[in-house]
Amino acid sequence: SNNPPESIATAIGASPRHRIYSHAGGNEPQALLMEFFADIAKGERDMVLLAGAEALRNQRKAQQQDKQLDWNEEFTAPLEDRGIGNIYPDPQEIANGMVMPLHYYTLIEQARRNDLGMSQEAYLDESARLMASFSEIASANPYAQWPGAMSATQIRDADPLTHLYPTRMIAQDSVNPGAALLITSVAKARELSIPEDRWVFMHGAAQGTDVDVSVRPTPGTSVVAGNVLDKALNMAACTATDIDLIDIYSCFPCAVSEVSDHLGLPSDGSVPLTLTGGLPFFGGPGNNYSMHGLAEMVWQLRKVPGHLGLVHANGGFLTKHAAGIFSCAPSIIDWATADTQISPEATSSCERASTPETGVVISYCVNFYGGAPVNVIVLAETDAGQRFVCCTEPTDNDTAQRILAADPTGERVAVTPGEQEHSWYLRLISDC
């Protein structure tokens, strides 16, 4: 479709005054909610339909069967197309093999593991227990993409993608989910005779953007995530202990533990951290998962009107964060003037080395193929505090095994220029 909002409007018989196609990013559902709450509070809009969907399973099946799908629709209605938005990978990251979210999140996960002082086996076991709790919740959700629940052992023993990620520990992307929210002013809700027991209000919200993973001073965490959560809770005049329901974006385990760690919640599965079952088991990768989290939050809050709920949405690589606090009780926040943005001054970044020679390993990612380790991506820091990313040579069949046998964090490495611009080939210092 040349106008996806108009495709939806046509399908439901609507004639909207504005049609907006948002940026990409898993944070967008919650970010848009804040934007349109403000517009409604200012009197600029009365009612907004937020809708999103993914057709990744259809696309995958068509590609596998060599079919050409024709979903073309042409409209002349005006469209505000905001474009794809910020794309975060740095040329040095891409040149050294960081081409999938999997690689970025493994670097984050490995840095977190090092911060906690945990062995690889213990860390994998902890992540598997966390994800098993998500799978159990998904198994009771009639909208989940996969039936049944997986045990921690089944998750832990699935085929490895990296040294910290088996296949069933991460978002599953071959799904066809869709969700929508309807937002109105109180006056419009009354005009439409919407029963008040169906009303849900937002009591606090915030959003912010962190720096690139490879130049993040603390690559095992995101300072902005904590700032966003604190700002939303402060606006709602509550603390983490007041939250009854929570749905945390769960593309990878560290996306969950980032939030649970900050809120002081256990990440061992003893406290439910998802309402749906999350991206690995409920489904919903791409950009729209948190719309499902928000919709589920609305449904569950209606059953327990006195409860408070928190939804965290994440985009990029723990880069773009948005959070909202919800309840059936009326909110006293004036969304026309509320400040929901975390200042960029809250973040700092390390300088990136353009011509590195040696450095100390900060984090790493061992990639697997066919069950075997095949290459390594390393995040390192020079003596001057500059960061750089490097990788093993295509013909290097030994370094991955050596790194799995002996964690190189804190060890010195050297690099030589790779075959393409910005690429650097890793050499363990003992080989130099």
Image (cartoon, rainbow, N blue to C red):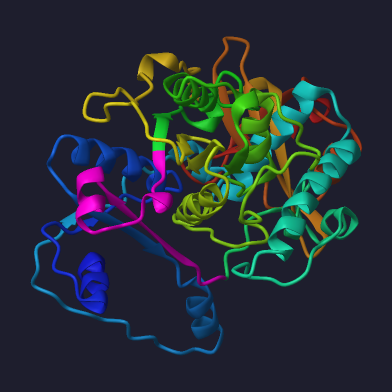
Residue located at (22% from left, 80% from top): 73
| Quadrant the N terminus occupies | bottom left
In the rendered image, residue 344 lying in the magenta stretch gets the answer no
Residue located at (84% from left, 40% from top): 126
The x, y position of residue 54, in whole percent, is 45, 67
In the rendered image, residue 199 lying in the magenta stretch gets the answer yes
Residue located at (27% from left, 30% from top): 335
Quarter where residue 226 is shown: top right
The x, y position of residue 89, in whole percent, is 46, 41
Q: Is residue 276 left or right of residue 323?
A: right
| Quadrant the C terminus occupies | top right
Foreground residue, 87 or 45?
45
The magenta region covers 175-201
The x, y position of residue 4, in whole percent, is 26, 68
Q: Is residue 46 left or right of residue 284?
A: left
The x, y position of residue 166, in whole percent, is 77, 55
Q: Is residue 44 left or right of residue 58?
A: left
Quarter where residue 125 is shown: top right
Foreground residue, 421 or 44?
44
Foreground residue, 388 or 142?
142
Residue located at (86% from left, 28% from top): 118
Q: How many marks?
A: 0
Does the image show residue 332? yes
Q: Please, is residue 143 above or below residue 28 in the view? A: below
Does the image show residue 425? no
